[in-house]
Structure formats: C-alpha cells, structure tokens
Image (cartoon, rainbow, N blue to C red):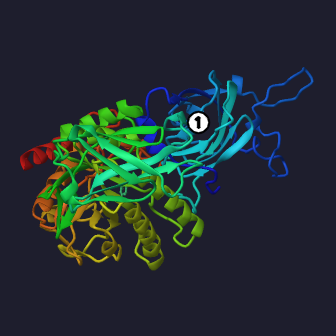
C-alpha cells in the first residue's frame, strides 16, 4: 500500500497558536476485520458499499451488517493490543471511526494530522478517500479543506499492522508490534498560505542554517519569510523554500544550549498571515578523530537505550506524561544521552529532552531482514527518513541520526543505506549520522571494525553482547575496539537479562547479580577503550516482545532492562548509576 495523498506539517502542530488545532484524541469506535470484508467483496474487488461509508439503516428493510455506533471503544492515542485482551496478538485490519461536529465556517485550509499510525492505513472523510499512508512511526497529514464545513462528519480509517518482508521494519523484530493510532490525531487550521516546515540550527562552523517552507496557491518565486528571536533582538528576512545561511560573524551573541545546561530561545517564524513559534536551543556538534564535541568541548555520552513503551502496563508510550517519567528514570541513572531505539518516538520525548538538556540519538526502523533490492521498500524508507528528519531537525537535543540497526554487510545493503544517508545529509547537513553495526564475537581481544557502512557514517555504533550471548565474562575488560577509519565508537548496545527480584550467584543466568556482573566487566572495558565516545546500554526498561517466551522469567518480555516493566530497579541500575556519577 504505497503512501498517497499525504502532506506533512507534523512538527508544527503543537507550536501553533491556541484555537488553530482541535484535538481528535479520546474514544474512537473500532471494528476488527481480519477478513477485510469492510474493504473487499467476496470476489476480492473493492467493496463500494465498504465500511468507510459509515452508514446506518434508513428503514427497517435496510440491511447494514456493521454499526460503528455500537462497536468496540478504543482510546486514542493508544495501541489496540493492550486495550482489549482479545486483540493482544492481533495484527490484521481494524477499522477506526470518530465523529466530529464543526460549528464554524471554515476559513483558510484544514488538515487532519496523525502523529503516527502503525503500520498502514487508508483514511476517509464522510465516505471519500483522503489517501493512504505506510510506515508506523512518522507523522503525516491529509488536506481536508472544503470538506469540513459546519455539521457532523465521520472520519474513518482502516489500519493494519501486518508484518511483511517488503515493509520497514520487516517480519521479525525483538519488540512488540503495537498496532493502531498510537499517537495523537489533530485537526489543524492554517491560512491559505502557511508554514509547512521551519527550522533553524547552528552548524559546526558556527553559522546559522535553516529553512522556512511555505505552502500555498500564491507562493511564487519571490516569496519571503521572517525569523525573529526577540530576546536577542535578532531578525532575518529569508527567501521561502530555500536553505538560508547566516555567516558566523553575523550570528548574535547567544548562550549555547549544552548538555545539562539547556538554554532555549523563543523563535518566531512568520510568512504572510501564518506564524509558528518554536523553542530552540543553539549548539554545535561535530567529531574530531575518535571524539564527539558539543560546542567545541569533548563530551562523553553517558547513555541509555529506550523503546517507546510506557512506564507501566507494557503499552505503547505516548504524550508528555510518559516522556516525563521515562526521562526522570534516565536522569536518575545519571544519563546525559538517550538512544531512542528502534524507530521514531513520540515528539514529546525530544521536546522534553530539549528542555532537560539531554542529547538524543533518533533512529529509523531499518532492522533485521530488510529487502535491500526492493525499490518500493527503498521508496518507503526514504519517506520514513523525511518524516524523521523534517520533524526533529529543529531540536537541539537531537545530535545523531541513526539509519540502521544490525544489518549484515553486503553491496545491496550498503547501497540502500547509502541512499538513506544521502537523504539525511541533504535534509540536515549539521548533525552526525550513525548506524548500530552488528559485530560478531571476535576470537582475540582486539576487534577492528571494517564493515563498509563504517565509512559512510560519522559515528560507529557497536552492538555487542559479550558476557551474555557469547564470550567469557572474565575476558571482557581486556577487549579493545577500533575502526579502520579512526572514528568515534559508541557502544550502542550491551547488556544481559535479569528478572527483577531474582537473586542468586553471579554465575546464574537471569539473576540481578549476573546482570550486574556483566555491567561491571563492560564498564571496565569501556573505560579502557580510547576510541569509545560513549555508550547506550540495552536497555532502560524491560519491554514486551513475542520473541521472549521463557515461562516464569521472560513471559513475553525482554529482561535486559535496568528496571522492570513497572519501573522497579535492578542491581545493574546502581552499577551504571555509580559509574556515571564517578565520571562527573
Ligand atoms: C539487539 C537488537 C535489539 C534486541 C537486543 C537483544 O542486538 O538490536 O533490538 O532487543 O539485541 O536483547 O538481544
């Protein structure tokens, strides 16, 4: 189902003036449709009387074999799997319907905006198809101008979370495939000419760079936009839809945003009648040899990896409260860096990281088993790349774009990922590009990374599980890592499984003691590796995954969390916390 009919204005939804955005969150009606009978007739043809029409019988002889008004209720945002026990492992088609009542006559243009829908959807308003979207984690919108005048309206989606080899991610992942409308839905009103995207950021050389994208019928070649930072008495007139640069000498004196010392400025972007306001921090990020520098200072990334799973209940995370709790835990650990694995997380996470002064790695769902030679797969992944970068390139916290996790070397793989890297650099030349590489257990103590992907990225992510999947724990401290390119290495994953409250000998699998001992050995190794610029151990919290079935221990959860799925701290939390504290 290739994406069609979408536009994107996602990153600006929450930064528009009050009154221009109407939340469509809340209770929606839902009908699971495993046989897709709401879409197709028994011959497999599109059903013209499909459920998207959302009709009711008009007289007693009318036969209508569905009824949204009395069907299941689902909370949006939310996954369907953890709201209705029968839907726990359900991945097929599911219909959503919400009615909206509009009072005022429409002025300007209107969009319906989805924070993310996993995985594919078709969308109808009042029985007319708006378009389709594929990709479970990026924001997208459909224009509904002229269709939402005063009165009642029916918004219908059919969503599926089916795993197929040509999708991204593909068929197997070590995380739960939460389906549905798992992020917010909004109706957004904008003027005829409006700001679709706007960003400003500091490049490594100290220049300001950015762009204001204006969309509208009258936008001609000469259209301009303005940027104002009142606190700095700074204003700038720029051509719309073109990259602008402000030379370092013309950049006003400002306080830098720095990890642990966040400083945000209010930046207003104006084009015609439209205005959006962002809170922006200014900082540089670059590499020098095997170091990562923020604002010219070497920063060691004391990190932790996170899935987008809520702090309790093993459900998909969404919104500011979930973000606040997860980031509280990361800050208690002493982290200055988060790896938001393995796909784009809720925008609340990066906004909160901006406010708290945490550095962030964001990631595309290019994970195991991708169909590297499929053009459709590449096109969809490029679309997901746009959604990732366009939403977050104004965020000071975001310093690393990760384009892949654990992919196996091969020309097709490297060519595919090479295209993603080109697109990322084109959309944002200021941040660092990385990928988490798969490393096989080395025989000796030295591992020299040669995966050709290492040449294309700025920072090399290394997932390694010495002491858990392989290797002798006693040998870990003596291991040494380097790359052919002399680039910074981040240990993007390391860890061991432990069930909270399970105690025993450090040689006994699944005990907190075993996990803590692996962390101790890994810390000793990392401290002695000069090329290592940081780490994001796997993982903050136990998370749901159908891959992990061991009764009494895993019960459907990956147990490598430093806290349990309900937030109870295991011993390894303290081990890492003490080390991070000792690093200052
Ligand atoms: C990995 C994957 C991650 C898994 C983890 C594990 O290398 O990147 O998604 O959850 O290992 O626990 O095995």
Residue 563 visible in the displayed image: no
The secondary element bearing badge 1 is classed as loop
Instruction: Decide if residue 289 is on the left or right side of residue 386.
Output: left
Quarter residue 268 falls in: top left
Quarter of the render that holds ligand 1? bottom left
- Viewer-closest of 3 and 284: 284
- Viewer-closest of 94 and 546: 94
Quarter residue 426 falls in: bottom left
Within 10 Å of disc 1 (Cα), the crowding (few <14, some 14-19, many 20+) is: few
Residue on which disc 1 sits:
108
Where is residue 309? Give x, y as percent. Answer: 40, 40
Where is residue 93? Give x, y as percent. Answer: 66, 43
Where is residue 3? Give x, y as percent. Answer: 61, 54
Q: Is the N terminus in the top left, top right, bottom left or bottom right quadrant?
A: bottom right
Instruction: Decide if residue 436 is on the left or right side of residue 220.
Output: left
Where is residue 41? Give x, y as percent. Answer: 83, 46
What residue is at 56 percent from the left and 59 percent from the top?
A: 167
């Amino acid at each position: 189902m290739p994406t069609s009919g979408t536009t994107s204005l996602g990153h600006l939804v929450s930064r528009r003036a009050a009154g221009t955005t109407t939340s469509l969150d809340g209770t929606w009606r839902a009908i699971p449709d495993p046989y897709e009978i709401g879409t197709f007739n028994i011959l497999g043809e599109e059903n013209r009387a499909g459920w998207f029409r959302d009709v009711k019988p008009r007289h007693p002889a009318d036969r209508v074999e569905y009824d949204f008004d009395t069907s299941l209720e689902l909370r949006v945002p939310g996954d369907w799997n953890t709201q209705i026990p029968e839907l726990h492992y359900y991945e097929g088609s599911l219909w959503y319907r919400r009615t909206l009542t509009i009072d005022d006559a429409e002025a300007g243009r209107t969009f319906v905006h989805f924070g993310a829908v996993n995985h594919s959807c078709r969308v109808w308003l009042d029985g007319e198809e708006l378009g389709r979207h594929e990709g479970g984690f990026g924001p997208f919108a459909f224009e509904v101008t002229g269709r939402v005048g005063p009165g009642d309206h029916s918004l219908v989606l059919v969503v599926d979370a089916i795993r197929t080899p040509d999708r991204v991610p593909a068929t197997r992942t070590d995380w739960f495939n939460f389906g549905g409308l798992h992020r917010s839905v909004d109706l957004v009103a904008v003027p005829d000419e409006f700001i679709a995207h706007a960003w400003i950021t500091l490049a490594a050389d100290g220049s300001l760079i950015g762009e204001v994208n204006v969309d509208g019928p009258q936008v001609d070649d000469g259209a301009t936009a303005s940027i104002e930072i009142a606190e700095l008495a700074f204003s700038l007139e720029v051509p719309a839809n073109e990259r602008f640069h402000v030379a370092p000498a013309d950049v006003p004196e400002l306080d830098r945003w720095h990890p642990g010392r966040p400083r945000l400025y209010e930046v207003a972007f104006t084009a015609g009648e439209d205005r959006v306001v962002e809170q922006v921090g200014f900082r540089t990020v670059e590499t020098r040899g095997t170091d990562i520098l923020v604002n010219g200072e070497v920063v060691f990334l004391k990190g932790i990896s996170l899935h987008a799973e809520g702090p309790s209940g093993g459900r998909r995370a969404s919104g500011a409260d979930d973000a606040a709790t997860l980031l509280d835990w990361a800050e208690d650990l002493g982290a200055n860096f988060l790896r938001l694995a393995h796909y784009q997380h809720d925008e609340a996470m990066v906004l909160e990281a901006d406010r708290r002064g945490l550095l962030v790695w964001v990631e595309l769902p290019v994970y195991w088993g991708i169909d590297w030679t499929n053009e459709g797969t590449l096109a969809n992944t490029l679309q997901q790349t746009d959604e990732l970068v366009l939403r977050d390139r104004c965020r000071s916290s975001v310093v690393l774009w990760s384009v892949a996790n654990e992919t196996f070397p091969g020309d097709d793989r490297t060519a595919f990922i090479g295209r993603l890297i080109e697109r990322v650099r084109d959309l944002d030349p200021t941040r660092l590009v990385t990928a988490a590489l798969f490393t096989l257990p080395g025989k000796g103590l030295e591992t020299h990374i040669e995966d050709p992907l290492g040449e294309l990225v700025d920072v090399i992510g290394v997932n390694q599980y010495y002491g858990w999947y392989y290797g002798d724990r006693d040998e870990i401290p003596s291991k040494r890592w380097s790359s052919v390119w002399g680039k910074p290495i981040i240990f993007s994953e390391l860890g061991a499984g432990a069930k909270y409250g399970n105690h025993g000998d450090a040689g006994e699998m699944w005990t907190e003691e075993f996990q803590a001992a692996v962390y101790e050995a890994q810390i000793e190794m990392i401290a002695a590796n000069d090329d290592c610029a940081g780490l994001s151990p796997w993982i903050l919290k136990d998370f749901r995954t159908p891959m992990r079935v061991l009764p009494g221990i895993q019960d459907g959860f990956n147990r490598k969390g430093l806290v349990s799925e309900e937030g109870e701290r295991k011993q390894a939390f303290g081990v890492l916390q003490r080390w991070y504290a000792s690093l200052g």
